[in-house]
Amino acid sequence: MRHLSLGMVALLGLGLTTAPFASAAPAPAPAIAKGNNWDVRQVAGGYQLTLRLGAPAPMRSALPLLAVDGEPIGVAKQAPDQRTLSLVTTDPEVLKAKDVQLVWSGDVKDTKKAQSRGAAAVGPNDAYWLKPRLGALLKDDPAKLGKFKVETSEYNLGDEAVFLPGLGQKSEVVGKVYTPVGATGKRPFVLFLHGRHQYCYGGDENEPQDKPWPCAKGSKPIPSYRGYDGAAQALASNGYQVVSISSNAVNAYDGGVYDAGAQARAELILDHLALWKKWSTVGGAPFGTKYVGKVDLQNVGLMGHSRGGEGVARAAVVNADRGGEFGIRAVLPLAPVDFARSTVPGVAMSVILPTCDGDVSDLQGQKFYDDTRYSVTGDTAPRSTVTVLGANHNFFNTEWTPGQSEAPSNDDWGGEAKASPCGEKYAGRLKAKEQQAVGTAYLSGFFRLHLGNEKQFLPLFDGSDARAASAGRAVVRVVAQAPLASRRDVNRFDQALPKGALTGKASAVVCAGAKLAQARAATPTCLSTDGSGDAPHWDPAYFAARTPTLAATRLSWRDKTGVLKLNLPAAQRDVRKFAALSFRTAPDPVGAAKLDLSVRVVDGHGKAVSVPVSKVSDALMRLPGPKENGLPKNLLRTVRIPLSSLKGLDLRDVRSVELRTDQVAKGTVYLSDLSFSSAGVGVSAPATKLPKVSASDVKVNEGNTGTQTVDFYVRLNHAATRPVTVYAETSGDLGTTVGDVVRTVVFKPGQVKQKISVPVKSNTRDSYDLQFNLTLSVPHEALLDKSFGLGQVIDDDPTPALTVGNLTTAEKNGDAAFPLKLSAPSDKYVGLRGTLKDGTAVFKQDYVSENEEWDPGSRVIDGYIEPGQLTGEALVKIVDDKVKEPTETFSAVLDQVDGGEVKLPVTVTATITDND
């Protein structure tokens, strides 16, 4: 079976056409492979694999995957009951399946190990990370309550108060408000959005309901929006206006949405901001004039947890696309998903990554940083990632934390073992309240820094790993890109090194992406992986699986003679205005668990100062955990050398920076983003002047002969002065009809439209209409506006005529069949359903339904014709008794059909001849 990574099968299940029969319609085609709780059925697009669970699957932010014999093969569509998951694949190996299980992003391919990941063994550096290098404590703590008392209230405008076009459904408008009492003037505004979690609890989970939201009678909404009190109180007490909003309706419906709900979450945020614009200008229910003149909506920060993280990133972009009505200046995705590889230029951003995230286990939010950092020339905003060791996904929200939540909740990592660095009993694993304290410190510090210009908190986010006392024993590592005005890039390490830069027994290659074990890669990949989520920079995204990931330089050496020398041009040699020299690095996962290099800086007088990396950073110390279960995470981390420590060096005339392999005899490391910089807050505002790139929607008739093309158009809303690039690829249930297209789209200055032609195979068979996407991702010098182009291939072939015949059979034959015949082959399963009726033959005495085994007493008869076939059967079972009796008859009245043209009802007769 093809081993696919957890992102390589984007949209296999989303947009999937499931079995074409509703409960009252003809039965679906029979299984051609099956197990205790799963089956495989042939469909027009290949093979439909369906798994049925005994209890509802948990609501998670990661997309559900189906694993066959331990190998994840695709993203599954989850039915509203959360018990049924299905996907379509073209891989015939599923017919040989022995076991099918539900797994999640970051789960290992060995699903038995995934279930017991808490029992993982010790990693080689675990002891170090229990007592690691620690940064300096800040004098001022961002979590400390300020001078204002905090008043809390809630607003609830109803469960279906606003229509969200990105969802196609109505959503609740519910929020919890935290107000600084006595604060004067307009206050900075911070909005929190929770992520994907179960949306209702209580009542009878087995009771079917017409729609998932609002909650069924007897159950209540889960108040996930109340789970961030710590950070909200800290901010409000220091003069910030805070609101935390509910998105249960989005969670209820986003399983079937083309983008997993990112656009809907953005729309919901902007709808709440529009309400606050009204309440803070003219007033209105439920607050009257209380907030008139009290809220500054040109100074807005957004925090989004989980799928809410992608939601707030999307909201910042949509706001800029629409002219920047709101001054969204700071965005903090917390343990976020990044399914579609969007960039967030112009806005201060910090991404929090918990290493023991058992939901978004691949830490895919890292790509927000990687993709945005050089996406726009002249971007003046700072950005960072904050990696929190020992933190899981759920405990940042008290309503997702056992012992604190109103509804049932859980530890998303699970496992009690002391050995695992993520087991709940491991010394380095943070307790729930410890983790919440970390969240409060960094959320409060980030927004106070970027909305309130409280620069005392800058060391938390500049890569120096300063600490807040309230964060306690938490080990945190920060990677930062200083704002442009405070940074001079020396080498990004994403292109081949200058000629002659490398000497000695060392080699360097630019790599991008991750290679699955035992799989080939067309270009050099940075590492090999089992697909378990250990490569956050390089794991592919779900909806943009072929879009290139971070390019970095992989430096390898065989002895201590290797030197990578970068010469500074004359105009860049004076570095006195900068505070530090920094770069990102990590050890290769194959090889020593602890490596070292020297950084040697040389001035124009020949004076040189050499600093071992290990003296200033533990970036070349592998992160905790053994090589399994998605651990250790392979993350580039910061090496930061204060220029003040380079004693005797002439900082007016720095000629070169060298990386030397003189510390250990051999090794391999990754390198990225070497620069001189100083900490700074930069300038952050909606990037309204950037061109906006959008994909068109298309609809085409399938046609009858050959291969035609359907043309998408990718457009800019106005011409750009610099080249604009964006990646485009087809995704969805393409089957054998729609071509697999991947393009890098380049707009030269002045160009505003590009055509992408997608091949569509024609045929003369009746088929289902096919839906797919053209996904745009990672734009350069532009913003994503409409990033999903929706494609439809409309079947234009007539429904074939269906004929049903009588049957004659001997009693001894057992199974018998009414013959079915089509006038032409179809790509659909053609199904019939009806009722068996007695004649001279008596039900149960002389014949029974084929459904008798699982539905005793049923008189239902089902028939089908497989795709591509002209004939089929409607089966019944004949009872072979020992009684001599005359020839007998019964009938089948067929009154439901799918996929065939026949005048209903059809009555056909079965004749049984006796054999006694």
Image (cartoon, grey):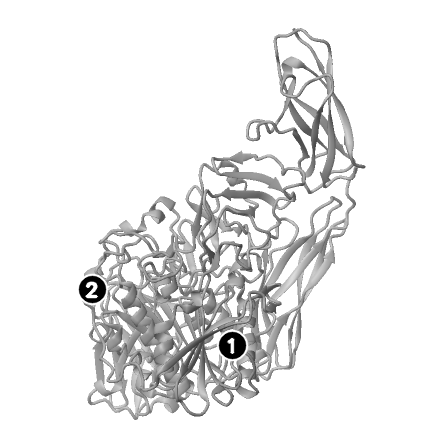
Q: Is residue 112 above or below residue 539?
A: above
Does the residue at mark 2 contact the one at mark 1 (Cβ under 8 Å)? no
Crowd around label 1: few <14 · some 14–19 · many ≥20 (10 Å) = many
Quarter of the image that includes the C terminus: top right
- The residue at the point 26 percent across, 80 percent down is 641
Residue 350 shows which numbered tag? Answer: none
- The residue at the point 77 percent across, 47 percent down is 797
Residue 316 shows which numbered tag? Answer: 1
The amino acid on which the numbered mark 2 sits, given as a three-letter code, is: Leu
Crowd around label 2: few <14 · some 14–19 · many ≥20 (10 Å) = some
Quarter holding residue 141: bottom left
Secondary structure, mark 1, is helix
Q: Inspect this view and state whether residue 23 appears.
A: yes
Quarter holding residue 243: bottom left
Looking at this view, name the residue that lies furthest to the right: 903
**Lateral position of residue 685 relative to residue 498, left or right:** right
Mark 2 or mark 1: whose residue is earlier in sequence: 2
**Lateral position of residue 685 relative to residue 915, left or right:** left
Q: Position of residue 757 (x, y in %)?
A: 67, 62
The amino acid on which the numbered mark 1 sits, given as a three-letter code, is: Ala
Residue 130 shows which numbered tag? Answer: 2
Q: Position of residue 745 (x, y in %)?
A: 59, 70
Closer to the camera in the image, 473 or 585 = 473
Q: Inspect this view and state whether residue 673 appears.
A: no
Q: In this view, does 863 lie above or below 638?
A: above
Closer to the camera in the image, 31 or 406 = 406
Q: Position of residue 160 (x, y in %)?
A: 58, 65
Closer to the camera in the image, 792 or 566 = 792
Query: Could you give the CA–CA distance between mark 2 and mark 1, rounded to whole angstroms?
Result: 38 Å
Secondary structure, mark 2, is helix
